[in-house]
Image (cartoon, grey):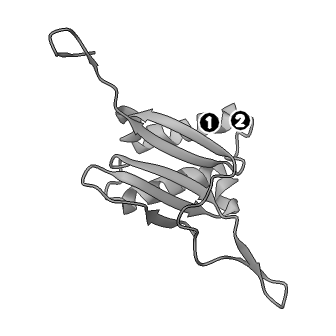
Amino acid sequence: MVRIMKAHKSPHGGAVRITIPAKVAYDLPAFQKSLGIVVEKLGCVECGSMFDCTFFTVRDFVINEALEISSVAEVDPTPEPAREIVVNLPLKVSSNIGLLQQAVARIADQINHSECTSGFDITFRNVCEFLFDEQGMIRD
């Protein structure tokens, strides 16, 4: 189960927390598919709708009397990332699900786990950078 919680909402995006099971975090194709599920829930199947998203791997569990384990239903509203990767994305990447999924694959390669995200909490941040010249015009 992928649980999506909006930390705050603004007309131009905001912070979104997504809690995923280890089975998704440790399976790169499943994690990439979860990205599509999240952006669809946020309102656009092609992009992240300018939301900063953090994917947390479930770390809170309960074991019952029969020694069966399940994840805790309630999620800490402000969890501390255990091992965090922060990805700053230009809008051209964050607004294209295909490029976002490619970015995840490249991150997995960089951490030497080409098939998973290795249990890292991953934050995707939209970054808008503008360079102005002396006349107040935006430069490319």
Horizontal and vertical percent for residue 111?
A: 71, 35
Which image quarter is the C terminus in?
Answer: top left
Extreme-bottom residue of the structure: 65
Which image quarter is the N terminus in?
Answer: bottom right
Image-based side of 22 in relation to 96, left or right = right
The residue drawn where x is 42% and y is 44% is 97
On the question of residue 40 being in view, the answer is yes
Which image quarter: residue 114? top right
Give the amino acid at mark 2. Answer: Ile
Q: From this view, report whether residue 96 is shown above or below residue 121.
A: above
Horizontal and vertical percent for residue 47?
A: 36, 47
Q: From this view, report whether residue 56 is shown above or below residue 138.
A: below
Circles 1, 2 touching at the beta carbon (< 8 Å): yes
The residue drawn where x is 37% and y is 60% is 8
Q: Secondary structure at mark 1?
A: helix
Residue 128: which numbered mark, if any?
none
Mark 1 Cα shell of 10 Å, populated few (<14), some (14-19), many (≥20): some
Residue of label 1: 107
Distance of label 1 from label 2 (alpha carbons): 6 Å
The residue drawn where x is 64% and y is 45% is 84
Mark 2 Cα shell of 10 Å, populated few (<14), some (14-19), many (≥20): few
The residue drawn where x is 28% and y is 55% is 10
Horizontal and vertical percent for residue 129?
A: 34, 26
On the question of residue 47 being in view, the answer is no
Residue of label 2: 111
Closer to the camera, 134 or 40? Answer: 134
Closer to the camera, 127 or 8? Answer: 8
Closer to the camera, 77 or 22? Answer: 77
Q: From this view, report whether residue 106 is shown above or below residue 35.
A: above
Q: Secondary structure at mark 2?
A: loop
Extreme-left residue of the structure: 135
Horizontal and vertical percent for residue 112?
A: 75, 35
